[in-house]
Image (cartoon, rainbow, N blue to C red):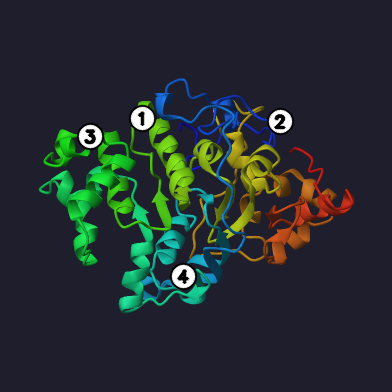
């Protein structure tokens, strides 16, 4: 999406977002509205569930996948400072839930996803799946990867150009020693991914498919192992606008039909609005705001979230100007890690709220704020919530 969170436009001071009410548009599955007012008329919505459809209820409130105080650090080269790519993340994904992990490029979201997948061992903290700690070595990890599958951004790079569609989808079955009917399993996976009749695609090669069809093959390769959770890293970023809506609708349908959970990594808040139940906003290695998608994207509390929303094409006011350079995980500032770029601090609003010094010097975890499941790591938002007597914070616009 042009102007998405990964490409902040630094032009002109203006509102920080936080629009009241639902923006315009249509969400696959029935949610009306889209941050920034971007509509889906460019999408082929023939695969979208009818408006008013409700998501499948969560099977359980107990987390399926959980990260607790997770940290991933990479040593610097030639004596350079350690890069704290993931720096104390707590994140839960419940059965049947879709969580969008949102942030600029370099914020650590892909490293976090890779650690949750078992591809990058954490420096400290732990990951649990179904209540059991994740073992990053041996057969236990292989079994875990069957239950948690990855869908990458670029389907062309994910598929071996010398392998047929059949072999690409069957690869996971062969790695895990599947003893059942391979042809039937591949056929079922392709059908669920929307490639019908599946036999028509068996002998095709990736170059003979469209971009959307290639992404469906990648999704089928994940589905064939009957996972409980999918981690999708920018699943539609490389696709034409004409097929993005179809892939989002497919992911929603798979959740409804199979009870799949999903972590969707994205810089695109429009995508988060269209597909997620909850959103977690990440900045410089930490979750700075999290909550139900409607609450977080229509009434954001953290200045960073508000800045991300302000650059959407039809956001009210001018895009927020973020001072300074993009975040560097090897140079984490003291206090709130966003304070060196924060528009609230720069405008004097934090000073008037009496928290400017705390913003610069006092680190903080994610704090309860805003009611319900919403949380935010911000001294200013917490001060505003205190002034309003708790619950939904009446956060002024900046």
- Residue occupying the point 54% across, 51% down: 97
Can residue 119 be seen here? The reply is: no
Give the total number of marks visible in the rendering.
4
Circle 3: element type: loop
Q: Dot 2 lies on which element? A: loop
N-terminal label among 3 and 1 = 3
> Which callout, 3 or 1, points to the residue nearer the camera?
3
Residue highlighted by disc 3: 197
Instruction: State the image coordinates of residue 39 (x, y, percent, origin top left).
Output: 52, 24
| Residue 21 marker | 2
For the residues labelled 4 and 1, the Cα–Cα distance comes to: 35 Å
Closer to the camera in the image, 79 or 211: 211
Q: In the rendered image, which residue does mark 4 sit on?
A: 72
- On screen, residue 377 above or below 119: above
Q: CA distance from mark 3 to mark 4?
A: 44 Å
Q: Where's residue 5, x and y in %?
A: 52, 41
Looking at marks 4 and 2 on the same chain, the residue that comes earlier in the sequence is marked by 2
- Which residue matches tag 1? 243
Name the residue located 15 percent from the left edge and 34 percent from the top edge. Answer: 208
How far apart marks 3 and 1 lie (CA) works out to: 19 Å
Distance from disc 4 to disc 2, alpha carbons, whole Å, reads 38 Å
Contact between marks 4 and 1 (CB within 8 A): the answer is: no
Q: On the picture, is 171 further left or further right than 335?
A: left
Residue 269: which numbered mark, if any? none
Residue found at x 82% / y 43%:
394
Which tag, 3 or 2, sits closer to the chain's start? Answer: 2
- Using the rendered view, name the quadrant where residue 176 is placed: bottom left
């Amino acid at each position: 999406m042009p102007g998405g969170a990964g490409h902040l436009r630094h032009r002109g001071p203006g509102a920080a977002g936080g629009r009241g009410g639902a923006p315009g548009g249509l969400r696959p599955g029935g949610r009306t509205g889209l941050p920034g007012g971007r509509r889906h008329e460019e999408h082929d919505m023939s695969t979208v569930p009818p408006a008013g459809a409700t998501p499948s209820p969560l099977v359980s409130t107990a987390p399926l996948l959980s990260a607790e105080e997770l940290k991933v650090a990479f040593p610097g080269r030639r004596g350079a400072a350690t890069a704290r790519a993931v720096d104390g993340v707590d994140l839960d994904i419940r059965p049947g839930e879709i969580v969008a992990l949102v942030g600029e490029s370099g914020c650590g979201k892909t490293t976090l996803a890779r650690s949750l997948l078992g591809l990058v061992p954490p420096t400290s903290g732990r990951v649990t799946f179904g209540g059991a700690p994740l073992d990053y070595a041996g057969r236990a990890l292989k079994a875990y990867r069957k239950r948690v599958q990855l869908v990458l951004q670029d389907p062309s790079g994910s598929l071996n150009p010398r392998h047929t569609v059949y072999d690409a989808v069957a690869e996971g079955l062969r790695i895990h020693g599947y003893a059942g009917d391979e042809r039937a399993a591949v056929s079922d996976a392709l059908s669920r991914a929307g490639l019908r009749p599946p036999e028509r695609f068996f002998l095709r090669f990736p170059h003979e498919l469209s971009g959307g069809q290639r992404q469906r093959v990648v999704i089928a390769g994940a589905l064939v192992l009957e996972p409980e959770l999918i981690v999708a890293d920018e699943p539609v970023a490389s696709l034409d606008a004409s097929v993005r809506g179809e892939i989002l609708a497919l992911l929603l349908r798979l959740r409804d039909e199979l009870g799949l959970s999903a972590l969707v990594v994205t810089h695109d808040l429009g995508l988060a609005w269209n597909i997620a139940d909850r959103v977690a906003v990440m900045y410089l290695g930490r979750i700075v705001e999290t909550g139900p998608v409607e609450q977080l994207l229509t009434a954001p509390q953290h200045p960073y979230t508000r800045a991300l929303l302000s650059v959407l094409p039809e956001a009210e006011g001018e895009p927020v100007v973020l001072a300074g350079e993009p975040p560097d995980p090897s140079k984490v500032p003291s206090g709130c890690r966003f304070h060196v770029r924060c528009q609230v601090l720069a405008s004097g609003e934090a000073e008037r709220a009496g928290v400017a010094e705390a913003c610069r010097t006092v680190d903080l975890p994610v704090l309860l704020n805003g009611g319900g499941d919403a949380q935010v790591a911000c001294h200013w938002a917490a001060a505003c919530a205190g002034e309003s007597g708790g619950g939904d914070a009446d956060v002024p616009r900046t």
